[in-house]
DNA sequence: AGCGTTATCGGTCGGCTGTATTATGTCAAG
DNA sequence: CTTGACATAATACAGCCGACCGATAACGCT
């Protein structure tokens, strides 16, 4: 069946098989043969589309990044024309947390990616660049919210941005089942409550949510 | 020199060599031969003390956990007889973040550990158990602080505990150099400020700290 | 002094890895 | 119908892995 084949589509199929391997079997089992088996193709065929292992890894991580970005953009678009900054920040955070299958895959991919980045100069630079860019996007929203009077003026935008990004620490807690999705979302909402509350509602209504 | 040898000490020496390998070369390079080279011993000798790779890994991670716990206990002891709960929580959080060489090692160890835990039933149970126990310790401090009136009574101890633990999300930001140690500490302090401030000081004095 | 125990080493084994090479099959254009 | 480019498969290969083994030597004890 070697009729002309859509290379890009083939490569994406293989990359998705790689994601499944990483998610289900772990980064240690990430071998060319395992990916080929998961994709239902032969090793030789895989190598026909990716000459080297590094090329496959780069393509798969890039695709995961794009996919994650696309989902974030869709979530933001669903918020309407001029969404409340609080909703924007919430959507960004929710997308980063492994709450739904889609974001769980990319979350695990980037976890393995970060771990490798600690010992690879080039990967480190790319991972750092991605994160810095994300940070800037969050900080812009925070600054605008302060300028619009939605967040108290004495809040330091740098500190608030850092605290928001640090909430991705829920990832570990969620993956290990220490907290449930509802508890994580409740905590995120409380944090956003306080960020946007000025001083009128420092606490919360106290719904019984949690864990 | 086969004079009688302190087995426990030998095993700890080897475990520390393993830590160095994980920290400097990465979890992917974690092989028996590499550890033996780092420890300056032969592969055969290493296997004399650890019959299997899994045994070595278990011992090394256990030791890392104990070490981390010991450092946390020391930090707490240094706070004096009846320390302020705020200082207790701060010390716990600081110990979890990769700010000093010691805690950076254990931080990376546990990062690799968590990543493997996602696909290994037994490792998952142990990692989860450790984290759950840590969570309970934090929640006890939070509840006591509320009972003592140091934290506003309308704060949900579960939510506050989750938010505190989520601050470990700074780990990734720190390791990739997206934020500096000073920025992370500033943000942690601000969060604790607000937790212990009731409603009199919802903001902060606004020192120029950061990044 | 002699013997059992412990420590250390080097080598070997089967297995798995990423990569490369070769062979076979399939299609479209000249 | 031939030719050549593409698709797929099968296999080879060199390297590293964890596990295992036997030889050797230094001690502790009797």
Image (cartoon, coloured by chain):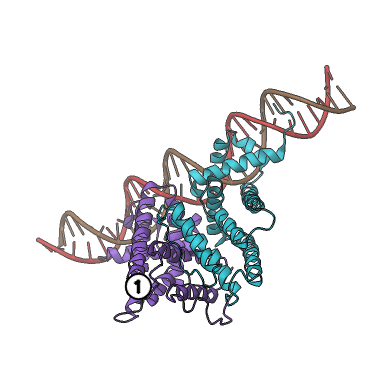
Chain colours: A cyan, B purple, C brown, D red
Toward the viewer: A144 or A134?
A: A144
Toward the viewer: A184 or B1?
A: A184
SS at mark 1 in the image: helix
Can you give x and y, in whole percent of width and height, for residue B153 in the image?
38, 70
Residue B37 visible to an observer of this rendering: no
Residue A156 visible to an observer of this rendering: yes
How many circles with numbers are drawn on the protein?
1
| Vertical comparison of B32 with C20: above or below | below
Toward the viewer: A80 or A38?
A: A80
Quadrant where the N terminus of chain A is found in the figure:
top right
Can you give x and y, in whole percent of width and height, for residue A38 in the image?
55, 37
Can you give x and y, in whole percent of width and height, for residue B93 in the image?
43, 70
Q: Which residue is mark 1?
A: B145
Question: Residue A18 occupies which quadrant of the picture?
Answer: top right
| Vertical comparison of A21 with B169: above or below | above
Give neighbour class at mark 1: few <14, some 14-19, many 20+ (Cα, 10 Å).
many
Can you give x and y, in whole percent of width and height, for residue A61 in the image?
61, 51
Q: Is residue B56 left or right of residue A99?
A: left
Q: Is residue B182 left or right of residue A14?
A: left
**Residue pictured at 34% horizontal, 68% vertical:** B143
Q: Is residue A31 left or right of residue D27?
A: right
**Callout 1: residue from which chain?**
B
Quadrant where the C terminus of chain A is found in the figure:
bottom left
**Residue pictured at 66% horizontal, 72% vertical:** A147
**Residue pictured at 69% horizontal, 55% vertical:** A81
Toward the viewer: A83 or B82?
A: A83
**Residue pictured at 72% horizontal, 36% vertical:** A6
């Amino acid at each position: 069946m070697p009729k002309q084949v859509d290379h890009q589509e083939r490569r994406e199929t293989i990359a998705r098989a790689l994601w499944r391997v990483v998610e289900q079997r772990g980064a240690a089992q990430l071998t060319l043969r395992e990916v080929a088996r998961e994709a239902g193709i032969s090793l030789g065929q895989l190598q026909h589309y990716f000459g080297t292992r590094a090329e496959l890894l780069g393509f798969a991580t890039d695709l995961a990044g794009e996919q994650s970005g696309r989902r974030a953009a869709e979530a933001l678009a669903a918020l309407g024309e001029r969404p409340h900054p609080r909703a924007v920040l919430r959507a960004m955070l929710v997308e980063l947390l492994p709450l739904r299958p889609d974001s769980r895959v990319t979350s695990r991919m980037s976890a393995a990616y970060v771990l490798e980045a600690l010992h690879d100069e080039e990967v480190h630079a790319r991972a750092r660049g991605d994160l810095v860019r994300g940070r800037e996007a969050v900080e812009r929203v925070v600054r605008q919210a302060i300028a619009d009077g939605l967040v108290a003026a004495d809040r330091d935008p740098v500190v608030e941005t850092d605290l928001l990004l640090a909430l991705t620490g829920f990832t570990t807690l969620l993956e290990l089942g220490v907290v449930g999705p509802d508890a994580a979302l409740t905590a995120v909402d409380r944090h956003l409550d306080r960020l946007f509350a000025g001083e009128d509602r420092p606490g919360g209504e106290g719904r019984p949510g949690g864990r």
